[in-house]
Amino acid sequence: MTPQQATKTMLVLLGLVILFHLLIITQMIPYTIVWAGKLKNEKDMYQFEGVSLFINLLLILLLLIKVNYLKLPLSPRFITIMLWLFVFLFALNTIGNLFAKTNFEKFVFTPLTFISSLLLIRIVKK
């Protein structure tokens, strides 16, 4: 897979993840199936989902800068370091998802975060 294909795939996945989190915020999907079942009320859900949306939007921004779709005055080295941090974050999240209380996280998000790690490695090492 080329870095460009990996980037496009990652952007599609991130778009789907953002849609998923918006469905949780609008309560079309129950918040009890995410965050390892640790959310106890709607306030927690809004806080955690807000963080998740921010992180996903930040990653989209970094990817768009990396492939020169957006021109912002950030050094390529900074973008690369940030993307490596996301590789690390997704790797940790993969491990965490293996121990989630819900099967949904174990069987849907474990592969998704693992694949995301691999895609980001491909993008960063271009």
Image (tube, rainbow, N blue to C red):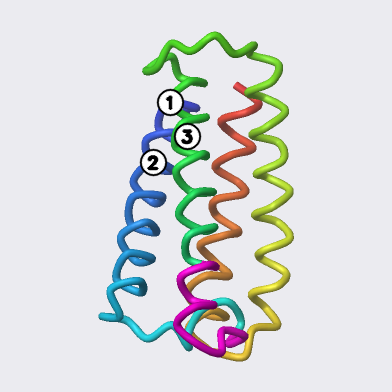
Please indicate whether residue 10 sits to the left or right of residue 103 in the image.
left
- Label at residue 89: none
Question: Residue placed farthest to the front in the image?
Answer: 43
Which label lies toward us, 3 or 1?
1
Q: Main secondary structure of the magenta part?
A: helix
**Residue 38 place in picture, x, y as percent:** 62, 85
- Residue 35 in the image, given as x and y percentages of width and height: 58, 77
Report crowding for label 1: few under 14, some 14 to 19, many 20 or more residues within 10 A (C-alpha).
some
Q: Which residues are magenta?
A: 37-48
Residue 95 position by quadrant: bottom right
Amino acid type at mark 1: Leu
Residue that carries the numbered disc 2 in the rendered image? 11
In the displayed structure, 124 sits above or below 87; it is: above
Q: CA distance from mark 1 to mark 2?
A: 9 Å
Label annotation for residue 64: 1
Q: Are marks 2 and 3 in contact (CB under 8 Å)?
A: no
Q: Residues within 10 Å of mark 3 (few under 14, many from 20)?
A: few
Q: Nearer the viewer, residue 25 or 86?
A: 25
Looking at the rendering, in which quadrant would you find the C terminus?
top right
- Distance between the alpha carbons at the discs numbered 2 and 3: 15 Å
The reply to whether the magenta stretch includes residue 44 is yes
Residue located at (48% from left, 88% from top): 32
